[in-house]
Image (cartoon, rainbow, N blue to C red):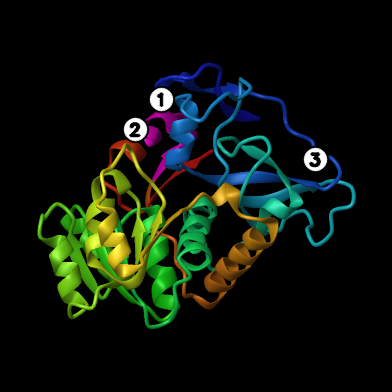
Amino acid sequence: MKAILVREFGEPEVMRLEEAPDPKPAAGQVLVRVEAAGVNPVDAYIRAGRYGPRERPYTPGSDAAGRIEAVGEGVEGWKEGDRVYTAGAISGAYAEKALCESRQVYPLPEGVSFAQGAALGVPYGTAYRALFQRARALAGDVVLVHGASGGVGTAAVQLARAGGMTVIGTAGSEEGRRLASEQGAHHVLDHHDEGHFQAALDATGGRGVDVIIELLANENLGKDLTILSQHGRVAVIGSRGEVTIDPREALAREAEVYGVMLRAATEREREGAYRAITAGLENGALKPIVGRELPLEEAPQAHREVMEGPAYGKRVLIP
């Protein structure tokens, strides 16, 4: 099979398309023929060597969608030809085939394309964990989603709307703001406008935002605390540096700030999240947005686009 291999950490160009042996599923494993693979910022951090030691060569990626090609001994519930999306991969997703634990694959409804399926694992899993498992968002809450036009952002908007919440979304381009509105955001703001925090507060009638989904904490966290409601919560998904905050803003509101890391979820939390996501796909509440499809060999370009933006839906690779 053809697969992207990383033999040394570095810039995107260290990813090269090469021939690799076809994986074979052992007990409890399945082999997925990949029709599309999702590209996530975490893939770029790992490729750059920022997430600690990792054996090389390796194939990047954890999110894919395709069909089951083979099942290992003892696997129940899956058969050859089943449509699936992955939330994790043993052998990496940037390849024509991906080896997965059977618990890492979930059914992909017929109405959902493979490219959309590749946009699910990390973005929707992270958004669900941030919104429901960490920030404990409830119907009736006002939720602010920073970066509402990217993969995680659009997922958070859709999940919040499906959960009966009022959604405020921010984006940095007119196209991104239009997308956030189309996905269900009640109020859409330009996050390049210095007044957008006040505008978000005004949208609540001055009461404050109950939950903030924060994808760039180094720029926003200090200001986030000033627009929270009493007992408001911030779920921090991403940050690209340090930040200074005034703890008194948190004290006055008895606010809470949560770190969100999908890989820290328990097996029960993980299973619950993806069961809920699959149900949302089946009933049409969740519709992943694919911003751009690129050939597998253009993985370096996909990494540059994911890290440099602007964010608009999900980048996926097509083997």
Amino acid on which the number 3 mark rests in the picture? Pro
Residue 298: in magenta span: yes
Inter-mark Cα distance, 2 to 1: 7 Å
Disc 1: which residue: 12
The residue stretch that appears in magenta: 293-303
Whether residue 145 is visible here, answered yes or no, is no
Q: Residue placed at 58% from the left, 47% from the top?
A: 263
Rendered view: 48 above or below 119 = above
Of residue 287 and residue 263, the one placed in the foreground of this image is: 263
Whether residue 45 is visible here, answered yes or no, is yes
Rendered view: 68 above or below 180 = above
Q: Residue placed at 36% from the left, 40% from the top?
A: 306
**How far across and how far down the image is residue 126, in percent?**
49, 55
Inter-mark Cα distance, 2 to 3: 33 Å
Amino acid on which the number 1 mark rests in the picture? Pro
**How far across and how far down the image is residue 153, in percent?**
36, 58
Number of other residues with Cα within 10 Å of mark 3, as a class: few under 14, some 14 to 19, many 20 or more: many
Q: Secondary structure at mark 1?
A: helix
Q: Is residue 153 left or right of residue 283?
A: left
- First along the sequence among labels 2 and 1: 1
SS assignment for the magenta stretch, majority: helix
Query: In the picture, residue 277 is in which quadrant?
Result: bottom right
Q: Residue placed at 14% from the left, 68% from the top?
A: 199
Quarter placement of the N terminus: top right
Disc 3: which residue: 25
Q: Residue placed at 64% from the left, 56% from the top?
A: 84
Of residue 17 and residue 311, the one placed in the foreground of this image is: 311
